[in-house]
Image: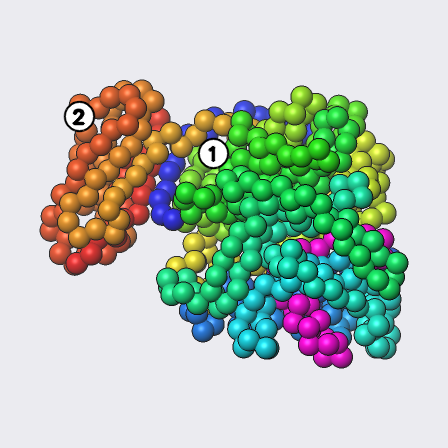
């Protein structure tokens, strides 16, 4: 995953239908956490599982280390700014293992928080696995017990089902049917070095089921699975509850990784309703590709569905009005809105506010349930009576010290954030402009192969129109080594060969192609 494309961003401004304001809130003694599950009762949050560290390390012995497991139940009251904790040690080993895992799928229905899957350490195999469990938690009872310091062991129930061995997906509900969307089954120890220490199988599916729970027995009735190996082959994405243009409940699966043929995020989305699903390839989402906090709002007055994404990780970001494509997919600060109009047409807008740091990945938006909402937790924007409304909070996630730390990560470059943000919606449309992200960027489509290389290499790129085109080679320190103007170009795909000279030491370099209207840079590795 390498490369960098810069293209002029033709910013089309739109008067904002609302604006967003975030206010930091800190609770004394609250630790950092990311990729967790949560439920809530009477304004208090029950936080389960997740990681105490930042981005997983590349060293196989240290990736997803058990030291980073969250082995506690955490109760947080954001109003009184208090927190309480209790260890999982009184629960069965099976419960302890799943409830200290990461990237679980979860949904709260009434008093019960249902948690599915998750990736974590398994004592029986002395290895890591994706758990095949569904666990039901009585949220009010557990919250009260943790605060009081009393036993909570009777408030957990767990069943096993191979269909629930999923991590990195989402569990949502449409009407009375549960939808387990996307994700994968990852068994064994994570290893990015190419060694076969794990198996990874994407579900490529929407697994639907009905759940009956009388408080004692959980009964699962599986419904026909929807499979799509191309468009549902995604994990670590954002699945957001929706009100569709016809007024029905739905879900939209935004972005995620990885495309079947390239290690890059999806740019399209998948709209899911009670009748099936539809892939929207006419819309391209350029910001907020990995799982992050998302705020859904619906305005019935003009039949518009708004989704606000807070930071995280993305293939694109804005830099002083230039849209930057970075195929290393860095941590970003961007807050963006995706709006679907009454005709089902979707558009993406960058908000004028950003996250205060490289934050958001693995965080959750925790709604204030006292604010008017539909049954599926989409906010009723038209029912906001005040100009400024506190709609909920963002807690945790990964805090990164730099955009691209993936290939150098030794555990010190990122951490789990303990930060809480209050999230406000401001309905006054005169105080902010949102910039439309047009759907026609990144047309140079630069490719370099082989890469790494030790001799000559070939560069391919695409031109939409004939223009003066320059190729340059830069060292990693930014020194320009070669500059040349290209001749005999044509509309469409162009190819030229580069010869390596006087680069005996090898190393990392940057090859840039530039026209009057676009610029693309790709990182290349030259072997000595």
Residue placed farthest to the bottom in the image? 90
Left/right placement of residue 513 relative to residue 275 reads left
Asked if residue 100 lies in the magenta stretch, the reply is: yes
Q: What secondary structure is found at the residue carrying circle 2? A: loop
Query: In this rendering, does residue 140 appear at all?
Result: no
Q: Which residue position holds label 1?
A: 321
**Residue 353: % across, % down:** 60, 41
Which quadrant is the C terminus positioned in? bottom left
Left/right placement of residue 475 relative to residue 253 reads left
Q: Which residues are magenta?
A: 87-112
Which of the 4 quarters of the picture holds residue 95? bottom right
Query: In this rendering, does residue 159 appear at all?
Result: yes
**Residue 297: % across, % down:** 73, 37
Residue 142 vertical placement versus 23 (above, below): below
Residue 280 vertical placement versus 90 (above, below): above
Query: Residue at coordinates 79% horizontally, 52% vertically from top-left?
Result: 211
Label 2 or label 1, whichever comes before in sequence order = 1
**Residue 1: % across, % down:** 38, 49
């Amino acid at each position: 995953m390498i490369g960098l494309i810069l293209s002029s961003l033709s910013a089309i401004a739109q008067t904002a239908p609302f604006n967003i304001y975030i206010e930091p809130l800190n609770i004394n003694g609250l630790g950092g956490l990311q990729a967790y599950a949560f439920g809530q009762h009477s304004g208090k949050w029950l936080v389960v599982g997740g990681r105490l560290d930042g981005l997983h390390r590349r060293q196989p012995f240290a990736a997803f280390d058990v030291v980073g497991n969250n082995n506690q139940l955490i109760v947080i009251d954001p109003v009184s700014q208090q927190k309480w904790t209790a260890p999982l040690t009184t629960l069965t080993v099976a419960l302890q293992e799943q409830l200290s895992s990461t990237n679980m799928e979860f949904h709260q229905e009434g008093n019960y928080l249902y948690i599915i899957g998750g990736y974590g350490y398994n004592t029986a195999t002395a290895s890591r696995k994706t758990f095949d469990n569904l666990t039901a938690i009585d949220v009010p009872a557990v919250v009260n017990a943790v605060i009081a310091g009393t036993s909570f062991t009777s408030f957990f129930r767990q069943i096993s089902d191979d269909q629930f061995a999923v991590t990195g997906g989402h569990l949502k509900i449409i009407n009375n049917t549960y939808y387990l969307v996307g994700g994968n089954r990852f068994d064994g120890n994570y290893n990015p070095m190419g060694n076969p220490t794990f198996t990874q199988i994407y579900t490529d599916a929407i697994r639907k089921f009905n759940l009956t729970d009388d408080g004692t027995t959980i009964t699962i009735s599986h419904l026909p699975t929807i499979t799509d190996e191309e468009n549902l082959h995604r994990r670590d994405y954002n699945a957001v509850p929706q009100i569709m243009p016809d007024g029905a409940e739905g879900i939209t699966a935004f972005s995620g990784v990885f495309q079947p043929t390239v290690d890059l995020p999806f740019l399209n989305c998948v709209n899911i309703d009670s009748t099936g699903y539809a892939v929207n390839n006419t819309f391209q989402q350029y910001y907020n590709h990995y799982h992050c906090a998302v705020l859904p709002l619906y305005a019935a007055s003009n039949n518009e569905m708004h989704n606000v994404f807070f930071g995280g990780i993305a293939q694109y970001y804005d830099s002083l009005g230039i849209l930057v494509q970075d195929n290393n997919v860095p941590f970003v600060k961007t807050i963006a809105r995706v709006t679907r109009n009454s005709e089902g047409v979707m558009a993406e807008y960058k908000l004028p506010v950003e996250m205060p740091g490289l934050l958001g990945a693995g965080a959750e938006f925790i709604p204030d349930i006292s604010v008017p909402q539909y049954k599926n937790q989409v906010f009723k924007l038209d029912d906001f009576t005040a100009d400024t409304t506190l709609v909920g909070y963002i807690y945790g996630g990964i805090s990164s010290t730099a955009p691209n730390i993936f290939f150098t990560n030794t555990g010190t470059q990122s951490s789990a954030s303990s930060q809480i943000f209050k999230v406000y919606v401001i309905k006054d449309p005169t105080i902010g402009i949102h910039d439309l992200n047009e759907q026609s960027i990144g047309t140079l489509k630069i490719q370099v192969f082989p890469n790494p290389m030790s001799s000559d290499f070939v560069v391919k790129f695409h031109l939409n129109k004939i223009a003066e085109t320059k190729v340059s080679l830069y060292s990693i320190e930014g020194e320009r080594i070669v500059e040349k103007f290209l001749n005999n170009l044509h509309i469409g795909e162009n190819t030229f060969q580069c010869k390596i000279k006087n680069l005996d030491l090898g190393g990392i370099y940057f090859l840039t192609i530039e026209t009057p209207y676009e610029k693309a840079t790709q990182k290349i590795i030259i072997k000595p």
